[in-house]
């Protein structure tokens, strides 16, 4: 049995607010939103960090970005803009070791990030 939180969410073992799902990708509302829109776009495949992305995963990563765009349009933040963040490793603050794209929008954001 997997110990990965996001694998459990994808498998339905842990509840979440799922807003998008297809054969490769699942998107959920972040439990601790940092903006009016804060969605986590997850590949169904367990890939711990960006460093573990293999050549076989490149299309899957594109599908995650395409799903993010789809959700951004659905949420109505395509016009105002949004940020897609993929934290990798300790200094970036990655806390769940299953790749996830944060789709954040609905308010102006600062740069550089903190
Ligand atoms: P990271 O820090 O790894 O880039 O992002 C992990 C994200 O997962 C955080 O934004 C956090 O709020 C979110 N998160 C942690 N546990 C849960 C959970 O059980 N359900 C949902 N929907 N989001 C979670
Ligand atoms: Zn996982």
Image (cartoon, rainbow, N blue to C red):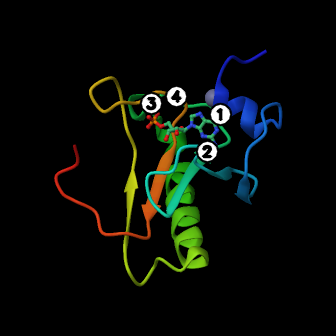
Disc 2 designates what residue? 43
> What residue sits 28% from the left and 63% below the top?
109
The answer to whether 82 is drawn above or below residue 59 in the figure is below
Asked whether the beta carbons under mark 4 and mark 1 sit within 8 Å of each other, the answer is yes
Which quarter of the rendered picture does the N terminus lie within? Answer: top right
Task: Identify the residue at the far left of this view.
Answer: 112
Please provide percent x and percent y for residue 58.
48, 48
Taking depth in this image into account, of 76 and 84 the one nearest to the observer is: 76
Which quarter of the rendered picture does the C terminus lie within? Answer: top left
> What residue sits 52% from the left and 43% below the top?
100
Quarter holding residue 110: bottom left
Asked whether the beta carbons under mark 2 and mark 3 sit within 8 Å of each other, the answer is no
Please tell me the numbered disc located at residue 6: 1
Could you give the CA–CA distance between mark 4 and mark 3, rounded to whole angstroms? Answer: 9 Å
Taking depth in this image into account, of 42 and 112 the one nearest to the observer is: 112
Disc nearest the viewer among 2 and 4 = 4
Q: Earlier in the sequence, mark 2 or mark 3?
A: 2
Mark 4 nearby-residue class (10 Å; few <14, some 14–19, many ≥20)? some
Could you give the CA–CA distance between mark 2 and mark 3, rounded to whole angstroms? Answer: 12 Å
Quarter holding residue 49: top left
Disc 3 designates what residue? 49
């Amino acid at each position: 049995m997997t110990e990965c939180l996001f694998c459990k969410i994808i498998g339905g073992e842990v509840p979440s607010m799922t807003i998008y799902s297809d054969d490769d990708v699942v998107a959920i509302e972040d439990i601790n939103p940092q903006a009016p829109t804060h969605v986590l776009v997850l590949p169904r495949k367990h890939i711990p960090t960006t460093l573990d992305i293999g050549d076989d995963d490149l299309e899957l990563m594109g599908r995650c970005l395409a799903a993010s765009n789809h959700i951004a349009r659905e949420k109505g933040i395509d016009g105002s803009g949004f940020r897609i963040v993929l934290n990798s490793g300790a200094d970036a603050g990655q806390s769940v070791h299953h790749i996830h794209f944060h789709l954040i929008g609905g308010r102006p954001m600062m740069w550089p990030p903190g």
